[in-house]
Image (cartoon, rainbow, N blue to C red):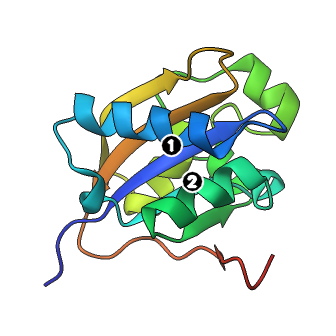
Amino acid sequence: MSAAPVVVGVGARRGVPAAEVLALVLDSLAAAGLAPDAVTALATVDAKAAEPGLTGAAERLGVPLLVYPAAVLAAVPVPHPSAAALAATGTPSVAEAAALAGAGGGPGAARLVAGKRTSVPGARATCAVARGGAVPAPGPVRTKETL
């Protein structure tokens, strides 16, 4: 059986630099006591699938960027829903919901190991880290070649 997936859910404003996303991801992993090589994927809402800051961070980490429709993420219970995220993307959570969906989906199959955090300076990105069961939930995988 493979190791439990560690998925970092990420949300971002348009134009966020990959360096800001990557710094936030690395800080969140450190806070959870995880090394960067533990990450099996980044995950986000489909509306952000081609955002250069997100694709660039995934590329630098050497992991895929999983994308989920807003309706799928909206169905994932999260501890910190956001009215701003709902207005911008159609789901009350991007970072936490995408992390949970990517790490295993179903009820009890995944858990947050680092709740939603916001980047500084600028607060243009959010992320959360989830650990799940042995197999991540399916989601379209976007790579540089398919964008």
Residue appearing at x 61%, y 14% in the figure: 121
Q: Are marks 2 and 1 in contact (CB under 8 Å)?
A: yes
- Mark 1, Cα crowd under 10 Å, few <14 / some 14-19 / many 20+, is many
Q: Is residue 77 visible?
A: no
Residue 125 lies left or right of residue 29; in this view the side is right
Residue pointed to by mark 2: 57
Give residue 22's mark.
1
Q: Secondary structure at mark 2?
A: helix
Q: Quadrant of the N terminus?
A: bottom left
Q: Quadrant of the C terminus?
A: bottom right
Q: Is 146 above or below relative to 56?
A: below
User: Residue 92: x, y in percent?
Assistant: 69, 31
Residue 108 lies left or right of residue 33; in this view the side is right
User: Residue 58: x, y in percent?
Assistant: 54, 61
In front: 87, or 75?
Answer: 87
Q: Secondary structure at mark 1?
A: helix
- Mark 2, Cα crowd under 10 Å, few <14 / some 14-19 / many 20+, is many
What's the amino acid at mark 1?
Leu
Give residue 86's mark.
none
What's the amino acid at mark 2?
Ala
